[in-house]
Image (cartoon, rainbow, N blue to C red):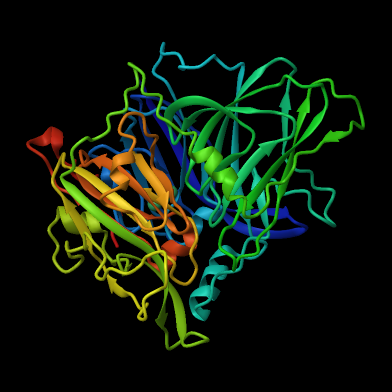
Amino acid sequence: CLVRHYNFRVVMANTTKLCSTKSFVTANGQFPGPTLYAREDDTVIVRVINHVNENVTIHWHGIKQFRTGWSDGPAYVTQCPIQPGQSYVYNFTITGQRGTLLWHAHVTWLRATVHGAIVILPKQGTPYPFPKPDKEKIIVLGEWWKSDVEAVLQESTKSGFPPNISDAHTINGHPGPVPGCSSQGGYTLHVESGKTYLLRIVNAAMNDELFFKIGGHKLIIVEADASYVKPFEIDTIFLSPGQTTNALLTANQDVGKYSIAVTPFMDAPILFDNLTAIGTLRYKGTPPYPKTILTSIPPLNATSLTYNFIDSLRSLNSNEYPAKVPLTIDHSLFFTISVGVNPCDTCLNGTKLVSDINNISFVMPTIALLQAHYFDIKGVFTDDFPANPPIFFNYTGTQPANIQTNNGTKVYRLAFNSTVQVILQGTAMIAPENHPLHLHGFNFFVVGTGLGNFDPEKDPKSFNLVDPVERNTVGVPNGGWVAIRFRANNPGVWFMHCHLEVHTTWGLKMAFLVDNGEGPPQSLLPPPYDLPEC
Ligand code: C2O
């Protein structure tokens, strides 16, 4: 195994998209940012140098960071931000995972433009557990605002209303087609007849769950969130922000042009974002002025397409890649996921939208939780995050009379190597929708999911404890629940939050504190000397 060195210079760049030019924050001037390549077992060292006028951190989304929580990146959780003019070196080893992940800024809404793909190849000499593709292509899906994204956030914080939706979805940075701006082409995927391509697809959008499909072609899914899955064929991929997948595409159709569609899934009736990004799959040797084979665009509320994709995901669970599902549970947790309304003196209606887990809207501390934990600094957080909601109500039925939430900076404490089951229960409060929950520091197994209220007697009987998919981000269905399991074998403080950035901002987040085990091999490493100060 190798040590791979990268430099990420966080700098401003200018670009024109949607007929409008703006200056925005980037890594190395690129949008999407540079791809990070490594093999399983490699050590990755990234020096991040902040040349912009605001605070920065970078998170390596889905990298387990065993014992290296200091390199995980969420601001005020594992580190204080890198201030203007400062730098910080992230240093971690990739163990027990291979596939595609993403990295992104993890402070305010900077990740809108500061993100990129992580490609983890198998160890040298280890083949893929599927036919070797001829070529690999990275496809990063994102969103683009014509205005400054931080201003969009501030405006929404001030008003108490949801932020403006983005002006376009993007494929590798390309919006398109753009009415009135037709000189700007969309993304083109070039292929050669008869060849097979491994598409490494990343949803780096801020607030939109996305469908991805290619006209006239089927895709074979082989991996999700950097874990191999049992291969299955599908024509529409569904990814929540933070999720990734690898798909095999064989160029086995007539030479020509085919459209690629990226379009949002919205099951919350109050949202109206139906912007579709169109790209092109183009065969080598396509004659001039070909006719493009179009793809049908999934409707906004195509819930059945989301289930087609999600229900097909199973861990590969082979001899080489067994699914190590915890079969006994030490911590059994039940978390409700809601959006509510709290009073706000300075907001337009006197109220603001908030979001919570077990009725707690998480308040970010001013010192990183991991520092407070390691140096035993009192008064930063409490470890009384509730294992259950404070009151029981018909979660997916009528909402309770009082929907105000409490504020708190609370963590849930886990003994080293204990096993955890969390039932994530969606609720019908205010604006029910699908919430993609992301856990830092671990992969978890998705052992069950269903609609309505979780039934503790009946539902566990149908859990899949054999080959459930292993992920780092999972959708809590609108008006339903999902059950996840993991082993707390990584000491440190690990953020869990909705990966719809707007809900994270509103407080839909919490953290697990995992204590050290016996002796140094089971303990958090000491902080690096250049750890930023608050
Ligand atoms: Cu992809 Cu906490 O984030």
The spot of residue 28 in percent (x, y) is 55, 44
Q: Quadrant of residue 327?
A: top left
Examine the rendered structure and indicate whether residue 108 appears above or below residue 176: below
- In the image, residue 58 above or below residue 21: above
Residue drawn at point x = 38 percent, y = 42 percent: 472
Compare residues 319 and 119 and report the one nearer the observer: 319
Question: Residue 486 location, x and y as percent?
Answer: 27, 40
Q: Is residue 367 left or right of residue 62?
A: left
Instruction: Decide: is 531 above or below 321.
Output: below
Q: Quadrant of the N terminus?
A: top left
- At x 29%, y 41%, the residue is 461
**Residue furthest out toward the right:** 289
Q: Residue at x 34, y 35 (%)?
A: 464
Q: Residue at x 44, y 36 (%)?
A: 225
Count of numbered marks: 0
| Front one among 375 and 336 | 336
From this viewpoint, is residue 86 visible?
yes
The extreme left residue here reads 518
Quadrant of the frame with the C terminus: bottom left
Of residue 408 and residue 337, the one placed in the foreground of this image is 337
Placement of 433 over or under 351, stated as above or below: above
- Residue 30 in the figure: left or right of residue 179: left
Residue 202 visible in the shown view: no
Q: Position of residue 359 (x, y in %)?
A: 31, 69
- Name the residue nearer the viewer: 119 or 471: 471
User: Is 148 left, or right, of 279 in this rendering?
Assistant: left
Q: Quadrant of residue 425?
A: bottom left
